[in-house]
Amino acid sequence: MKNWHAVEGWLDPPGVTWIESEQAWNFVLYSRDATRVVLLLYSEEEMTHPIYEHEFDLYLNKSGPVWHCRVPLDRASEAKYYAYMVDGPTASRDGFHRFDPDKILLDPYAKAVHFPEEFDRELAKIPGSNAGKAPLGVIDAENDFDWQGDEYVRHDQDFVIYELHVCGFTKHDNSGVPQSVKGTYAGVIEKIPYLRELGITAVELMPVFQYDPQEGNYWGYMPLNFFAPHSEYASSHDSAEQRNEFREMVRELHRAGIEVILDVVYNHTCEGDDRGPNYSFKGIGNAMFYMSEQNPECDNGHKGFANYSGCGNTLDANTLAVRKLIVDSLKYWRDEMHVDGFRFDLASIFARRSDGSISPDQTPIFSQIVTAEDFLNVRLIAEPWDAAGTYQLGHTFPGWLWMQWNGKYRDAIQRFVCGEHGMVGELMSRIYGSADLFPDDIEFSCRPWQSINYITSHDGATMYDLVAYEGKYNWANGENNQDGTHEFKWNCGYEGEMYAPEEVVRLRKQQVKNCFALLMLSNGSPMFRMGDEFLQTQQGNNNAFNQNNETSWLDWSRLEENADLFRFVKMMIAFRKEHSSICRSHYWRNEVKWHGPSGPCEMGTDSQTLAFCLIGTSMNSQDLYVMINGSDNEVDFGIYRGNNLQWKRVIDTSLTAPLDICEVSDRTLLTQASYQVQPRSVVVLIRDT
């Protein structure tokens, strides 16, 4: 006798599961408010009319809020794709529903997504059927993969993040990878020797979740689905094979000792508000998935979409369905795709209750993530703010010991390098590891490695553009798309790159070296965006979210043009790794001594100079003496650590290669207890032992 669930289906796991022993599929959909659900199965040849339909029986195929059914293979042996039609209450004064019984809806748990040739975003925005033109889930997406003994990777003292866009990394004609894999997961594999030479130990991939190919968002921060890898980043057109291409990339990066961190977006979807398409979440359970608020434009009590993400809607991580969806997605990418960590876009949205207010306590989603099975060693990174003004950087962020993008570090370094006066105290705090934000007292016991130190990211100008453009040049499709990012720029006296005087070009390169020197000399976890190491430019565009073209693609010709800068960055990373005294699991405390050019630190409103001596004894490392001159004048720095002559110069950003950072054989002893530090430059000495 068969068990009940062998006929009626079982309520877990969500999505579609193949039952080998029964030669049948189990389908599960979570829809709390639905009154009617129909499963649609399609063949590869026919995606307008299903080859099989199953209307769920309310009394047999529904358990609580879960709809489930079992479909034997012999009923639809040619089925390759699936979708749902869902009906329920209409939007009313008491509801926040967007059910449309005619819409073809994508399963939120689909592991791969197929877009028919006639896929139409616009049709999904209006009521009525979009049959044959809607995204579909792939039934047999769980194909085998040989991991070849792959293991997760975890770095500590040598952790350096490289923020990378899968497409833009190799899409340019001059990327040097085969034409067939440009802009793909396989293209990243081709560039692994480059990443190893550079010395980074982790790649943070901008969003790779499947997004709407017709939405026009190159960055990928408008997800359609939280399980499927984005199909356009795969060289194969077979939707079932695309996940294996992602796995191959992860496996080969691991083989090279490089962590894989995903930039994940769990705060909103590409469906937007009522002006956006109805692809999946809206039609399956709008009130279950999204936060609502009273619509000020309606006098009938109609509820609209809360928008704390800045993208039209906000997922409600307070509901069981959304919490489960997020945790299941994270575990899928960890367990099945071998990802090492996650960077959460606008993570402070998780701190909001369903009504949008900020919870003073940790909301359940944080506990659910960190206590997920085998998640103890998963790297968790937060962008600790949202688009509605919440800012929880440091110990105020509710995720215990999460790493966090440190926006105050970014601002401080930009301001100081630009030449702003009175920044010495702030600069000290950021170099030290931001102990003011991540205190290690008895109450909080934070660690400096929680601070992700960065000066540039995808969200803003490139490092070169910070020193080459003071304006924003975001013209695209006839509009100047300004962003809300306030950046601190100085163009070195000349706007733009064309016809820039030679002395300006030299100074710009020196300023970029200053940025990398300060970044790699700071306690904490450094990150920089792809291409900064060879002066990648977006011609002043600091919001290239929709620029899937040469504006955003890495121009690899600049690597050859700026080989000296690449050498400096590569050696600066190696220098950081060689000196374990810089990046520690704890703060420097009494092993750092702060100085000014001629004695104690100068903390006045006009000060632009700072020096510090970092003692490396406890870390079995050489002592370092760092002198920083942000002014326009040459400054004579005394060396106030024993006042002896046992120091060798390693770095001087004012010099040209190869003297700007010296090989071990080229380091010579100083002949006096002071050093002339040139304007706008950083000098690093090591004590000879």
Image: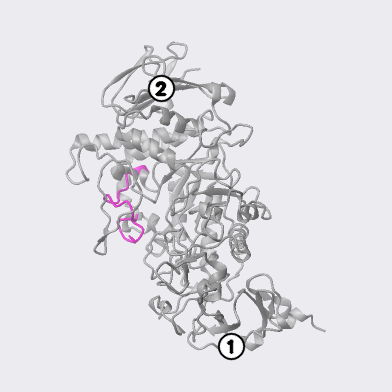
Q: Which of the 4 image quadrants contains residue 287?
A: bottom right
Rendered-image quadrant of the N terminus = bottom right
The magenta segment: 533-553
Magenta stretch contains residue 298: no
Which of label 1 and label 2 is nearer to you?
Answer: 2
Q: Which of the 4 image quadrants contains residue 20?
A: bottom right
| Magenta segment, prevailing SS (helix, strand or loop) | loop
Helix, strand, or loop for circle 1? strand
In percent of width and height, residue 662 lies at 38, 27
Q: Earlier in the sequence, mark 1 or mark 2?
A: 1
Is 188 in front, or is 63? 63
Q: Residue furthest front?
A: 299
Residue bearing the label numbered 1:
52
Amino acid type for the residue under numbered disc 1: Tyr
In percent of width and height, residue 197 lies at 44, 43
Amino acid type for the residue under numbered disc 2: Ala
Residue 52 vs 139, above or below: the answer is below
Residue 54 vs 302, above or below: the answer is below
Q: CA distance from mark 1 to mark 2?
A: 73 Å
| Side (left or right) of 327 relative to 295 | right
In percent of width and height, residue 35 lies at 60, 82
Residue bearing the label numbered 2:
611
Q: How are the colours assigned in the image?
A: one colour
